[in-house]
């Protein structure tokens, strides 16, 4: 096999190159034949004028099928009509792998496919340059997140994904048989990352995988999702945690803007990097804004999908903000481990264009208070014994958040559906691929 010398976006006039990729399109104008060769970085035009290439190559150009894998050796020439102003005149073409003629979907994006067909044939769907672009941006999001957190002296950790109990609520657990016992897939690293605060590690983060048995089929919930989770010690209140979150998100947006220009322009997306600090909207204010706009919402209840979306529009109109914190939630809407002042939770959500992308707050670090809250939530204290033990032997005040990556990319790129930003999304109905 010919060895690739560069990707299609890196060819230069006058060079001899070897490209490797898929046959995106073919055109035949009689005396001149074209192939568009697609690789990860773009599309290159292979031009074979009858008079300038060998007879063998001229014939081979005819026999190639769409989506065949080929390598092409040739000379780069400038050509104003070609994409990128350059074309490759082939001197050698190798067929590496053929494709059946009837394709399950059209990678050249001329024919639209519905989301189910796309996900059923994801390997081919991802060949589309716009879909590839989403996953290159996703990689940059993760790189930037690591970069930022490491720069703020966080230590990266990994915690178990099989656990003895749930964290975020009983109904969304996936049970599994663990030898002679029952265990569950981890809904979040919550309990482990809090335990880490008792180890003296002080500031930790995890690129975490969540498993949640979300019954309803929504455009923003999956059975498996990814998040950046952090936990930090010696905080004064939840504001210290919000400070890290807003700077993290702002840094991620800035990095994507600077380092993924080609992908953003392909997707037709302009990212607005908001100034920090992000706007803080108190829960009470959010309820009033929604009531004024005619929504039937009541103090004390968590915001539903519709009101969350409406609030996003109201805040955008009133202040021009895409990203804003919702603060001072009623304690009753938050999990048992949430710290509080009276009946107000020291917790927050971060919303992006009307969808929650992160939740966090200060946690309870006093073991007696924690036990009381577990009881008040109607949970059995006995099943939290292992979690509670570290709180008995020196636990600093701490807090953290979980930032959903799939939600972040969905809102950043205005994707219709969370599934578009996940390679192989799994949900209530879909377990394959
Ligand atoms: P929601 O109320 O929107 O269902 P949640 O409050 O249950 O979310 P958290 O427990 O706060 O979710 O999890 C932290 C973050 O993880 C969320 O803000 C979201 O970005 C992401 N997340 C949670 N559950 C899912 C899911 N099922 N699919 C995709 N992302 C999720
Ligand atoms: Mg939440």
Image (spheres, helix red, strand yellow):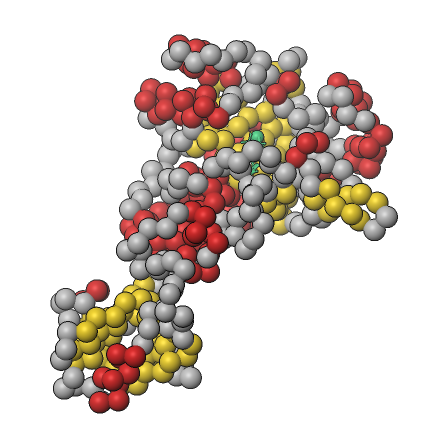
Q: Position of residue 132 (x, y in %)?
A: 40, 57
Name the residue: 80% across, 32% down: 384
Q: Position of residue 263 (x, y in %)?
A: 34, 53
| Number of callouts | 0
Whether residue 344 can be seen here: yes
Q: Is residue 198 visible?
A: no
Q: Nearer the viewer, residue 111 or 384?
A: 111
Query: In the drawing, does residue 233 fall left or right of residue 411?
Result: right
Horizontal relation, residue 48 to residue 239: left or right: left
- Farthest residue to the bottom: give it: 55
Kindly identify the residue that appears in the image at 45 percent across and 21 percent down: 307
**250 shown above or below 311:** below
Rendered location of residue 296, percent (x, y): 47, 12
Q: Quadrant of residue 45?
A: bottom left
Quadrant into which the N terminus falls: bottom left
Lateral position of residue 169 relative to residue 415, left or right: right
Q: Check the picture and name the quadrant holding the C terminus.
A: bottom right
**Residue 429 % position (x, y):** 56, 43
User: Which residue lies at the image location 21% right of the left edge and 64% below the top edge?
Assistant: 83
Frontmost residue, 175 versus 79: 175
Q: Nearer the viewer, residue 400 or 306?
A: 306
């Amino acid at each position: 096999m010919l060895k690739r010398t560069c990707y299609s976006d890196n060819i230069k006039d006058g060079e001899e190159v070897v490209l490797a990729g898929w046959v995106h399109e073919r055109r035949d104008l009689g005396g001149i034949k074209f192939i568009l060769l697609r690789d990860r970085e773009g599309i290159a035009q292979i031009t074979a004028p009858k008079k300038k290439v060998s007879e063998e190559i001229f014939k081979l150009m005819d026999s190639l099928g769409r989506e065949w894998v080929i390598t092409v050796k040739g000379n780069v020439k400038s050509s104003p009509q070609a994409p990128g102003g350059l074309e490759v005149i082939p001197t050698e073409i190798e067929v590496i792998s053929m494709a059946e003629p009837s394709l399950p979907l059209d990678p050249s994006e001329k024919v639209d496919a519905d989301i189910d067909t796309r996900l059923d044939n994801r390997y081919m769907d991802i060949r589309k340059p716009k879909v590839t672009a989403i996953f290159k941006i996703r990689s940059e999001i993760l790189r930037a997140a690591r970069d930022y957190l490491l720069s703020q002296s966080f230590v990266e950790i990994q915690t178990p994904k099989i656990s003895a109990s749930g964290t975020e609520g009983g109904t969304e657990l996936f049970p599994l048989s663990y030898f002679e016992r029952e265990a569950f897939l981890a809904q979040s690293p919550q309990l482990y990352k809090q335990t880490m605060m008792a180890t003296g590690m002080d500031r930790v983060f995890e690129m975490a995988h969540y498993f949640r048995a979300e019954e309803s089929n929504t455009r923003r919930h999956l059975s498996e999702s990814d998040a950046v989770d952090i936990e930090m010690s010696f905080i004064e209140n939840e504001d210290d945690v919000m400070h890290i979150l807003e700077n993290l998100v702002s840094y991620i947006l800035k990095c994507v803007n600077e380092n993924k220009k080609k992908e953003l322009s392909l997707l037709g997306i302009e990212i607005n990097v908001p100034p920090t600090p992000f706007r803080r909207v108190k829960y009470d204010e959010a309820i009033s804004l929604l009531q004024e706009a005619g929504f039937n919402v009541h103090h004390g209840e968590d915001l539903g999908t519709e009101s969350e979306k409406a609030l996003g529009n109201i805040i955008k109109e009133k202040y021009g903000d895409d990203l804003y914190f919702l603060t001072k939630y009623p304690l009753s809407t938050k999990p048992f481990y949430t710290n509080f002042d009276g009946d107000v939770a020291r917790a927050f959500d971060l919303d992006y264009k009307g969808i929650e992308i992160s939740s966090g707050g200060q946690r309870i670090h006093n073991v007696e208070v924690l036990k009381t809250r577990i009881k008040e939530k109607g949970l059995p204290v006995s099943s939290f014994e292992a979690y509670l033990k570290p709180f008995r032997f020196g636990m600093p005040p701490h807090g953290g958040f979980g930032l959903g990556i799939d939600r972040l990319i969905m809102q950043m790129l205005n994707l219709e559906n969370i599934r578009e930003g996940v390679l192989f999304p799994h949900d209530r109905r879909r377990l394959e691929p």
